[in-house]
Image: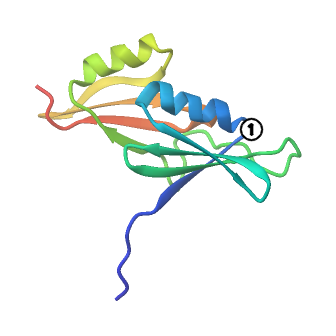
Amino acid sequence: MATFTYDHMHFRSPDPEATAGFYERMFGALVLRSVQAGKPRVDLDLCGTKVFIAKVEADGKTAEAPSSPYKGLDHFGLTVSGIDAVVAELKAKGAEFTMEPTTIRPGTRIAFLRGPEGVAIELVDRNAA
């Protein structure tokens, strides 16, 4: 059987710079700017994960994001420590939470916030008191 390894996530945004700025401001992502086929390109290094951000043109050819919950990829998660303090820090930066920190089982707390274009982002604290 073939060996598979994780490579990247791909976002679509009408404003890649604003999208990149959100992930840089909220999570400390490294913004990587380059030129591809003569056009500016914006990518991220988010916690060691490559994230490509493709510009969506205002030509009506790209569907709007679905409303959660829906079938298929629902969200991505980031591990944190001290989730309550992290949530307070992100709120101070303007983050919009769709689920406040919640204990889902002993020692594990989660919260959800909304990223650009409605992307759902889960914060997971697996060592919560």
**Residue shown at 49%/58% (left/top)?**
8
Question: Of helix, strand and loop, which one carries label 1?
Answer: loop
Amino acid residing under circle 1 = Pro
Residue 125: image quadrant is top left
Query: Height in image: 71 above or below 5?
Result: above
Q: Nearer the viewer, residue 124 or 11?
A: 11
Q: Nearer the viewer, residue 99 or 26?
A: 26
Query: Height in image: 85 above or below 81?
Result: above
Can you identify the residue that label 1 sits on? Answer: 14
**Residue shown at 42%/31% (left/top)?**
28
Is 27 displayed left or right of 16 in the figure? Answer: left
Query: Height in image: 49 above or below 84?
Result: below
Is 15 displayed left or right of 2 in the figure? Answer: right
Is 60 displayed left or right of 73 in the figure? Answer: right
Q: Quadrant of the N terminus?
A: bottom left
| Image location (x, y in percent) of residue 106 | 12, 34
